[in-house]
Amino acid sequence: MDQTADTPDTPLVRMSGIVKRFGSTTVLDGIDLDVARGEVVTLIGPSGAGKSTLLRCINGLERIDEGSIEVGGDLLRYDESHLNDIRARIGMVFQAFNLFPHMTAAENIAVAQREVLGRSRGEALERSRQLLDRVGLAHKERAYPDNLSGGQQQRVAIARALAMDPALMLFDEPTSALDPELVGEVLQVMRDLAQEGMTMVAVTHEMRFAREAADRVVLLADGGIAEQGPPQQVLERPGSERGRSFLRELDQH
């Protein structure tokens, strides 16, 4: 196994010289980014800056063209068994909820536990109930997705990712498909996870969440990292012209 010394001080994620191209377009051009254990990193930036692409590279959903990625000291390779091993440590929440419509909330959370982790039906459903309670949906365990609001469905999707006991959670604009009044309930679950010490990387356009929950804000633009640092610095006193122009654009919306 390609493994470096994995100690508590080793970054949980280490991305070095990441280049990602789509055809003749270079979306990521030499990205270096470490994520420490227990750190909450938010990725912000203009549309098309490669935020979601960078997130998807971490668990191998997008294959990098150059550079290297390590997760927990393991060098990411693209053979299926290794990818499955890496992905077993990573929970990912997308814009779309992707719940099975014919399964209840509890069953949606239980299915991967049974198929991937080998838990019994009883064990998986008990864990599902615990996680539904954790995301504020204990009363919805028997509800089907069609009977849940968008915010409730996204909270079930978060619980489903947590059911795999991940070391790292990735969020790809998890509130962008929600009506404005439902955004807060999902962000609160994410804040709670942050306070509990979950390592998280989140692509978000919710600057309030970035301000309140992130340890570090990373601004992507023009294929690279334009600026990074504590939220107060990047969001209130950006040192780069690219950062200042991005904030001006935000203020106009």
Image (tube, helix red, strand yellow):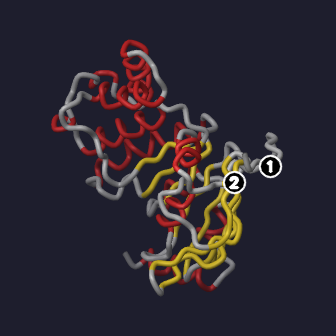
Kind of residue sitting beneath label 1: Thr
Between 191 and 103, which is closer to the camera in this rendering?
A: 103
The answer to the question of whether label 2 and label 1 lie on touching residues, with beta carbons closer than 8 A, is: yes
Position of residue 206 relative to residue 31, above or below, is above
Please report the residue visible at 42 percent of the width from the left and 34 percent of the height from the top.
159
Q: With 177 as the anchor, is 127 left or right in this view?
A: right
Q: With 250 as the anchor, is 193 left or right in this view?
A: right
Counting residues from the start of the chain, the first of labels 2 and 1 encountered is: 1
The residue carrying pointer 1 sits among few (fewer than 14), some (14 to 19) or many (20 or more) residues within 10 Å by Cα, namely: few
According to the picture, the residue beneath numbered tag 2 turns out to be 75
Q: Position of residue 246 (x, y in %)?
A: 51, 79
| Numbered disc 1: secondary structure | loop
| Numbered disc 2: secondary structure | strand
According to the picture, the residue beneath numbered tag 1 turns out to be 4
Disc 2 to disc 1, C-alpha distance: 8 Å
Between 110 and 222, which is closer to the camera in this rendering?
A: 110
